[in-house]
């Protein structure tokens, strides 16, 4: 009986051990599965963190790249703007070339000694221009296109102011130049030449709205009222006048509007007149210059071995040649064609406005521009050498406007 009981207990123990082992195996598998699950979860978490970190870094890189691109674009735009400040646009170049073409037969050459020059630098807006005398009406300094200009208001006469209030300053040979503004409004403008007794002996009168031009001298009147008398489009235009002992020629831009062959009386001084349709109307002028002498350029060369000319002018701070320079350039070109043996050192000079470095660079680029222009006109480049001297060789003091005007020049030195 006991043997049966022991046998039963032994079987129960064996069965219990088997079940326990199976339970432990199951528990082990569960623990193992749970551990694996936890490891997988941790791996996923770490992987998620790594992905997030990677995404964050990628996003940061994209943002940096975008900012860098935006900065690069901004810099490019700023650089482009700076380039536009330094160089003219294609449309501006086209306009400049068009004006230059119209001046191809221009024969006005300024005098070789500046006796009056007013660039209006340092003048205060709203004040009367310090280099002028007022005879009647009102005039003041105004800012037009970011440059000082003389505004003649209503019915006004003004005249250049010379030392000791002299009214006998015009020599037997002289030139007069200035720029004037046509703004689409009505108005008339006149240049009046007076003798020593203040009597008007010659005058020019033109209307800026209808191309009408009148010249009067020796009690003789000539009137030009054709469609092509002169260009009266809106903007700045150039007036030029030359007097040679008895003959006077008058130009508006590239057009010769009057040719007076014989003036009996010699002009002693000059005054400018302007009048509009209303009392508060305005007429604007700037860059007034009077120069002495009308000696042909070749005669100047024979006398001194070089030609000092003020007839080749440039845009402010640039090497862009102004169209009205074509009178001087045409004469230089004809001289070189007539004398094939001539060779020139073309030398640019500036006044002392600005730094020495910038003036040196500017004078060099201007000399090169003149050489290039003459080459375009048919002169062999080998006959021309460009040099720039900046502000290093002044002819006069830079303390006066006339002195600075004399120092701003182009010289043709015979080689």
Image (cartoon, rainbow, N blue to C red):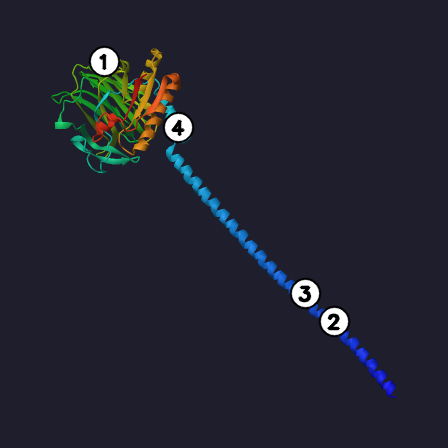
Cα distance between the residues tagged 3 and 4: 79 Å
Question: Mark 2 and mark 4: span between their CA atoms?
Answer: 93 Å
Q: Quadrant of the rendered structure where residue 132 is? A: top left
Asked whether disc 1 touches disc 4, contact meaning CB atoms under 8 Å apart, the reply is: no
Q: Mark on residue 272?
A: none
Secondary structure at badge 4 equals helix
Q: Is residue 226 visible?
A: no
Q: CA distance from mark 1 to mark 3?
A: 116 Å
Q: Nearer the viewer, residue 140 or 351?
A: 351
The one nearer the camera, 269 or 290, is 290
Residue position for label 3: 36
Residue 94 found in image quarter: top left
Say which element carries label 3: helix
- How dense is the environment of label 2, judged by Cα within 10 Å: few (below 14), some, or many (20 and up)? few
Answer few, some or many: residues within 10 Å of disc 1's Cα (few below 14, many 20 plus, some between 14 and 19).
few
Q: Nearer the viewer, mark 1 or mark 4?
A: 4
- The residue pinned by badge 4 equals 93
185 sits left or right of 172 in the view:
right
Q: Which residue is identified by label 1? A: 261
């Amino acid at each position: 009986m006991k043997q049966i009981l022991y046998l039963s207990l032994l079987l129960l123990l064996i069965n219990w051990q088997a079940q326990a082992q199976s339970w432990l195996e199951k528990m082990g598998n569960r623990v193992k599965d749970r551990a694996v699950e936890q490891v997988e979860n941790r791996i996923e978490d770490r992987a998620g963190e790594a992905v997030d970190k990677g995404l964050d870094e990628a996003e940061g890189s994209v943002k940096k790249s975008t900012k860098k691109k935006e900065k690069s674009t901004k810099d490019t735009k700023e650089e482009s703007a700076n380039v536009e400040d330094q160089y003219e646009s294609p449309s501006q170049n086209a306009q400049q070339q068009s004006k230059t073409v119209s001046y191809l037969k221009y024969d006005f050459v300024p005098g070789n000694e500046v006796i009056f020059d007013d660039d209006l630098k340092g003048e205060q807006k709203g004040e009367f221009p310090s280099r002028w005398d007022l005879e009647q009406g009102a005039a003041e300094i105004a800012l037009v296109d970011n440059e000082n200009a003389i505004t003649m208001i209503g019915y006004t006469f003004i005249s250049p102011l010379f030392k000791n209030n002299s009214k006998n300053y015009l020599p037997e040979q002289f030139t007069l130049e200035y720029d004037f503004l046509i703004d689409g409004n009505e108005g008339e403008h006149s240049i009046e030449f007076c003798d020593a007794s203040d009597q008007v002996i010659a005058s020019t009168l033109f209307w800026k709205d209808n191309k009408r031009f009148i010249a009067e001298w020796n009690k003789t009147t000539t009137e030009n009222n054709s469609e092509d008398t002169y260009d009266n489009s809106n903007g700045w235009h150039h007036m030029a006048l030359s007097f040679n002992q008895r003959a006077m020629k008058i130009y508006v831009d590239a057009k010769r509007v009057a040719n007076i062959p014989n003036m009996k009386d010699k002009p002693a001084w000059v005054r400018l007149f302007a009048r509009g349709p209303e009392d508060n109307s305005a007429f604007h002028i700037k860059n007034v210059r009077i120069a002495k002498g009308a000696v042909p350029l070749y005669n100047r060369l024979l006398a001194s071995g070089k030609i000092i000319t003020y007839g080749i002018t440039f845009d402010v701070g640039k090497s862009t040649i102004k169209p009205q320079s074509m009178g001087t350039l045409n004469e230089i070109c004809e001289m070189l064609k007539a004398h094939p043996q001539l060779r020139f050192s073309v030398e640019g000079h500036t006044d002392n406005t600005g730094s020495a470095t910038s003036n040196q660079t500017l004078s060099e680029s201007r000399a090169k521009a003149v050489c290039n222009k003459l080459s375009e006109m048919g002169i062999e480049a080998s006959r021309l050498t460009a040099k720039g001297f900046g502000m290093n060789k002044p002819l006069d003091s830079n303390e006066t406007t006339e002195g600075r005007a004399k120092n701003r020049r182009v010289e043709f030195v015979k080689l």
